Structures are given as C-alpha cells and as structure tokens.
Image (tube, rainbow, N blue to C red):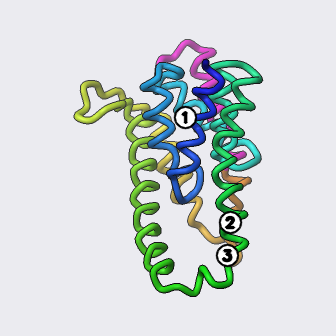
Amino acid sequence: MIYLSLFWTFFKIGLFTIGGGQAMLPMITNDVVAKGWLSSAQVMDFIAIAESTPGPFAVNIATYAGMEVAGVAGAVCSTLGVVLPSVVIIVIVAKLLSSFMKKRAVNEVFVGVRSTVTGLLTSVFVTLLLSVLFGVNSLPATSFSPDYVGITMFCVLFPASFIKIKGKKMSPILLIAISAALGVLIYGLLDHFGIAI
C-alpha cells in the first residue's frame, strides 16, 4: 500500500538522519528516485520549492513528495513519517536532558555527529551545484550541459550573501526574494523569446 510505504520511507529518513532537512537530502533523493516515485529533476525542483517556502525544510520536502506521489493522503503520511521520530526523540531527550547531557560519551557522540553533518551538507551543496548549474546528474559525468545564466547568477548572488552592509549581513529572506525574482524574470524572458539555455 502506497500510504504505508510513504510513511515508512519518510519515517526511516526522519529517524536515521541528524542535522536537519539538508542532511536528509541524500537519503530522500536515493529513496524516492529508487522507488520510482520522483525523477531526479523533480527532486531538484522540490528542493528549490522547499527551500523557498516557510516552514521546516524536511517537512516541506516530505509533504511535496507525498502530494506528488499519492495526493493529500500521501502528503499527510509522508509528513507524519518524517516528523514522528523527531517528536519521540525530543520527548525522550527532554525527560533525560539534565543527566543525559553531562555524560562524556554523549558529548563525544555529538563531536562525531557534527563532522558527519558537515560532510552531508557539503555533499548536498556539491550535488545541487553540479546538477542545477552544470547538468551533471551522476558521477562520472556522462553528459555536461552548463547553464551559463544560472552560473552567472550564482557567481553574483553567492558572494553577496556574505557581504555586510552597515555591520549586518544581507537578510536571507531578501536574498531568496531577489534570487526568485531574477530567476522568474530572466528565465521567463528567455523562455518567452524562445532562447534555449
């Protein structure tokens, strides 16, 4: 049954990934593409949508994937699946927090987890960069189709995210809004005039 399968798949993803929604991306991509629920291109589109909409990334991506696969009921099942492990773990940790965090072994585990999450996030960044900007969907690359407009936008907007104006960094919301507006404007105009990218 598709609903149980969606719930179980996203339950495992929620249970076995630490570090937030972006750290879940490799598992989400592997599972939903391997099961034939979504194509790699659809996953990339959902990632862009989930990053741009309010709410936790993992919940957004699970909801979008579930909706695409099995409608509203699928969205509910996948969202419950991805959220349930975190809720249970947080309740357990909250009960044991005072004595739990004082243990040396727990602190050592968190040191290892931090480096693992850093590696996962780097993997996600490189995968998205290669896929979206250079058209490379697998390594070793069998095809290569760079998006020069996207590369130019990335080269301008990525460094802009580190610029400080009057001692403050640019707001991520403003950067997302600028990126979305430029994407719609530039790609919309190119599409309107029939210019292939």
How far from the left and from the top, in percent, is residue 75? 71, 29
Q: Position of residue 194 (x, y in %)?
A: 55, 12
Badge 2, how many Cα within 10 Å: few under 14, some, many 20+? few
Q: Which residue is mark 2?
A: 92
Give the structural element (helix, strand or loop) at label 1. Answer: helix
Q: Is residue 114 visible?
A: yes
Q: Amino acid at mark 3?
A: Leu
Q: Select label 1 or label 3 by which is in front.
A: 3
Name the amino acid type tagged 1. Thr
Q: Secondary structure at mark 2?
A: helix
| Pointer 1 residue | 9
Task: Tell whether label 3 touches label 1 (CB within 8 Å).
Answer: no
Question: Which is nearer the eye, 164 or 82?
Answer: 82
What is the quadrant of residue 108 in the picture? bottom left
Highlighted magenta segment, given as a residue range: 176-197
CB under 8 Å between discs 3 and 2:
yes
Check the picture and name the quadrant holding the N terminus.
top right
Task: Please give the residue where the numbered disc 3 appears in the rendered image.
Answer: 96
**Location of residue 140 with respect to 110 vertically, above or below:** above
Which residue corresponds to the image point at 71% horizontal and 39% vertical from the top-left? Answer: 80
Spatial CA distance of label 1 from label 3 is: 28 Å
Counting residues from the N terminus, which is met first, the one under dot 1 or under dot 2?
1
How dense is the environment of label 1, judged by Cα within 10 Å: few (below 14), some, or many (20 and up)? many
